[in-house]
Image: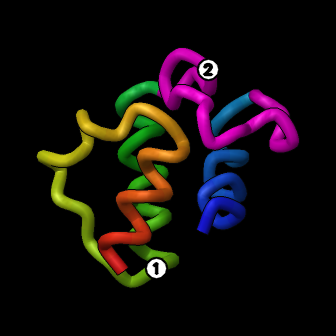
């Protein structure tokens, strides 16, 4: 799951894919804004065939948070 998330994030950040770590902060480290964040969520929903409630978005601060959340949602 981590690799899938990193692959999707790679398309939205200028941070080199090799430097995206589980502890990377989505906004501060990867430079994501709300538009790119929701595009990423949409891409992951499509890829995994799941739907993520928008209310849960503020809880997801790091790559690891996103991976853990997706693992629980599958």
**Dot label at residue 29:** 2
Query: Does residue 48 appear left or right of residue 55 in this picture?
Result: right
Q: Position of residue 62 (x, y in %)?
A: 49, 35
The rendered magenta stretch, by its main secondary structure, is classed as loop
- Residues at marks 1 and 2, CA–CA distance in whole angstroms: 25 Å
- Tell me which segment is drawn in magenta: 15-32
In the image, is residue 54 above or below residue 21? below
Check disc 2: other Cα within 10 Å, few if <14, some if 14-19, many if 20+: some
**Dot label at residue 48:** 1
Write the residue at 31% across / 73% down. Answer: 73
Q: Earlier in the sequence, mark 1 or mark 2?
A: 2
In the image, is residue 29 above or below residue 62? above
Q: Position of residue 19 (x, y in %)?
A: 82, 34
In the image, is residue 2 above or below residue 28? below
Q: Is residue 23 magenta?
A: yes
Write the residue at 36% across / 80% down. Answer: 74
Write the residue at 60% across / 33% down. Answer: 23
Query: Does residue 20 appear left or right of residue 31 in this picture?
Result: right
Write the residue at 72% across / 46% down. Answer: 10
Query: Does residue 68 appear left or right of residue 30 in this picture?
Result: left
């Amino acid at each position: 799951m981590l690799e899938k998330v990193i692959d999707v994030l790679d398309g939205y950040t200028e941070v080199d894919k090799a430097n995206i770590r589980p502890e990377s902060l989505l906004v501060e480290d990867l430079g994501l804004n709300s538009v790119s964040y929701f595009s990423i969520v949409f891409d992951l929903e499509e890829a995994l065939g799941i739907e993520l409630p928008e209310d849960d978005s503020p809880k997801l601060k790091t790559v690891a948070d996103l991976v853990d959340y997706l693992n629980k949602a599958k």
